Image (spheres, rainbow, N blue to C red):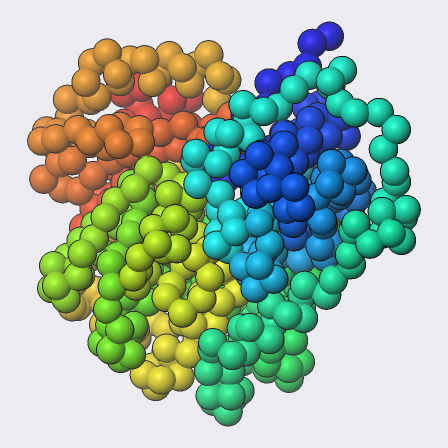
Amino acid sequence: MSDVPIEFGTDGWRAVIADDYTFTNLERVSQATAEWLLDDYGPSPSVVLGHDMRFLSRQFSERTAEVLADAGIHVTFADTPVSTPAVSWATHALGADAGVVITASHNPPEYNGYKLKAHFGGPAPPDMVETVEDLVQPSNQLPDGRPDFEALTSDGQVSLHDVRSGYLNALHNILDIEAIKSSGLRIAHDAMYGAGQGLVTALLGEEQVVPIRHENNPGFHGLAPEPIEERLGELSTTVAETDCAVGVANDGDADRIGMVDENGDYVSSHRILSLLTKYLYEERGLSGSIVKTFSTTHMLDKMAERYGLPIETTPIGFKHIARKMAEGNILVGGEESGGIGATGHIPERDGVYIGLLIVEMMVERGKSLSELVDELLEDFGPHYNYRDDIHIREDQKAAVLDRLDAGGGLDEVNGHPVERLDTLDGFKHITDNGWLLIRPSGTEPVLRVYSEAESPKAAKALVKDASRQLGLDN
């Protein structure tokens, strides 16, 4: 059987373990990474390599280290499971030429993956990723006779490093940890069995943090570790029934954020982004551009206009935002799916940093999270979002996208004529009652349908009507 094609999605290569995600295919990707580094960074490049808590992630990471080190790359190997932001931070802090994380992030437990980080401490931009993709060779082109992990560690080509502690020290320096600790606010932290477990506790102490799903469970109890509303029931109940002031959740590699307020009510990424913009501009007196992806709230456009800040919209994927954060003065950058970055830190989404920055905002303002959200809606008007992830065969997905492309999108949605169709990344229908976006996932066999309107009911109605029109509601 011929080697399967290796394709990177919106944030890395991901595939099902023992199907396309095999040790052999991982070696192909690692060898391509090594060739790219040697071509671009000279004869002695360096990499920071980390892994999450998924099934076989440590073993996959060691195999990656073997391939890279055998090719002449010096590998700084995280000696414990670490979050993706920790690897990004270490890549920049240690002056490495690239970072690699063995993780499938928020994907279902049967997946694993390979994230590539640039020297500036954020996702590798599309041109770097395309270079690595182009260099992937068939398995019969891989070198033979490679030294094993122990031998490479013994001779110093692979160096074990405490990445986790260095990252925690960095967070302690950029957040007002003492103010949060002095406030006495208790925080429920849902790690979703992922690499973020223990991080908030390490910063604030056991008395201030209620841990949820902090055990080692490589199968995530069968659920994808994605911090979306329907998967945060335990966090919501814990906060609502205890004296916790807020709940913070992170995905499998802790680069995404999900939050609930003191009542256990979910607070979307759209609102977290908007709250951060308001806090950083009004309270901290900071300025800079706002960068958001195509599926993110238009409330940010209103905020940019009022504050006199530049705003830019990118395709889906934090890699598009990261390069802009590395190159320019960006106040906040983020996406609907929970990936958010902010000034003062690495050009990377970081769920732990963002969650604690919101808690810092609560302490600074002396208000609960629900009060801050109410204030936001009073200032900038009602904005409510809805999203359906529709699992669909590849041929069905292609048929839907072909239909939208050929017809120029839908003519109307839920009785509202489409005034404009934007196709930056998918098909975004602008109406007089909000917007609706249809686009395929870059990492899963899923079609995503998003919306925004002036009420929760109207936002949901836009999605359901579009799904009906496209035959996706069965």
* Residue in the picture at 49% in, 59% down: 350
Residue 239 position in % (x across, y down) = 52, 71
Residue 181 position in % (x across, y down) = 53, 87
Most extreme residue toward the bottom, as rendered? 182
* Residue in the picture at 67% in, 63% down: 163
Instruction: Say whether residue 419 is visible.
Output: yes
**Left or right relative to 267: residue 245:** right
Residue 380, picture quadrant: bottom left
For the C terminus, the quadrant is: top left
Picture layout, residue 6 above or below residue 169: above
Residue 104 position in % (x across, y down) = 61, 41
* Residue in the picture at 90% in, 48% down: 150
**Left or right relative to 135: residue 159:** right
Q: Which residue occupies the foreground of this view, 142 or 396?
A: 142
Picture layout, residue 409 above or below residue 286: above
Most extreme residue toward the top, as rendered? 1
Q: Which residue occupies the foreground of this view, 369 or 309?
A: 309
Residue 314, picture quadrant: top left
Most extreme residue toward the front, as rendered? 43
Q: Which residue occupies the foreground of this view, 55 or 176?
A: 176
**Left or right relative to 50: residue 381:** left
* Residue in the picture at 69% in, 26% down: 28
Residue 162 position in % (x across, y down) = 72, 65
Picture layout, residue 3 above or below residue 154: above
**Left or right relative to 471: residue 187:** right
